[in-house]
Amino acid sequence: MANNNQSLWHEFKKGLWDEIPPFRLVLGTCPTLAVTNSVINGIAMGLATLFVLLCSNISVSAIRKIVPSEVRIAAYVVIIALYVTVADMFLAAMFPPISKALGPYVPLIVVNCIILGRAEGFAQKHPIVPSIMDALGIGIGFIMSLIVMGSIRELLGFGSILDIKLLGNWFEPWIVMILPAGAFFVFGFLVALTNYLSRKKATETHGH
């Protein structure tokens, strides 16, 4: 039981750092760059992605032994599209302004490499419970990534976070931060920082 719990914990925590999608695996970069001009947009996209990832992982794991290998990718895409449609309709009905701000990027979750990658690379090889832990770890890691990027871009681009003014009138907003160029700049910085911290951690570990 202890080994099983340890294994499940490993599947969960790997998505929080070692396999954090945008900065370590460089997956899901399109929504990461496109919607993080504000924190709330990043949170909404992250939650929608987590919902689709969790539901698709469970579904793929549940049917993994009955779907012929020749059609499994097509089957996975149909499953993912179903949950993306649910997420898109929910956002449109309950949070119209956020749905409008996210534009086409919620429907594009269908082709998000994170979702299909976890379905093909993990869920179709493992039982439901490990697949749930994998989805939760990767999904939460993705949300964390979007929040960090959104916080930096919104703070420097608007002087606020979640529409709460943090920088006074003295601050001149960096308009570039809410433009695509700012997204690439922040993304590159965070990828470099993540790689640096990972190498530093590995060096310290081997040193001991």
Image: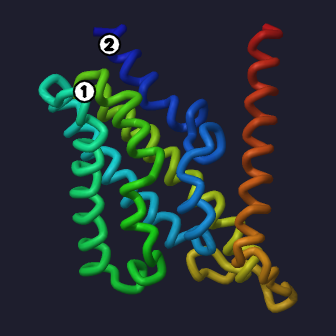
Q: Find out whether the residues at labels 2 and 1 contact each other: C-beta distance under 8 Å.
A: no
Farthest-out residue, left:
66
Q: Measured from the top left, where is residue 164 in percent x and y? A: 61, 81
Q: Is residue 175 above or below residue 9?
A: below
Report the side of 75 relative to 2 (left or right).
Answer: left
Q: Quadrant of the C terminus?
A: top right
* Residue density around tag 1, few if under 14, some if 14–19, many if 20 or more, within 10 Å: few
Q: Measured from the top left, where is residue 161 in percent x and y? A: 63, 74
Farthest-out residue, front:
70
Report the side of 201 relative to 26 (left or right).
Answer: right
Q: Measured from the top left, where is residue 6 in percent x and y? A: 40, 16
Q: Is residue 97 above or below residue 197?
A: below
> What residue is shown at x 67% (from left), y 74% (from top)?
154
* Residue density around tag 2, few if under 14, some if 14–19, many if 20 or more, within 10 Å: few
Amino acid at dot 1: Ser
**Which SS class for mark 2?**
helix
Q: CA distance from mark 2 to mark 1?
A: 28 Å
Q: Which residue is mark 2?
A: 4
Q: Which residue is mark 1?
A: 69
> What residue is shown at x 77% (from left), y 34% (from top)?
197
Q: Quadrant of the N terminus?
A: top left
Q: Measured from the top left, where is residue 24 in percent x and y? A: 64, 38
Q: Nearer the viewer, residue 194 or 167?
A: 194
Q: Nearer the viewer, residue 61 or 203?
A: 61
> What residue is shown at x 79% (from left), y 62% (from top)?
185
**Disc with the residue nearer the chain's start (2 vs 1):** 2
**Which SS class for mark 1?**
helix
Q: Is residue 39 above or below residue 9?
A: below
The quarter of the picture where residue 95 lies is bottom left
Farthest-out residue, bottom:
169
Amino acid at dot 2: Asn
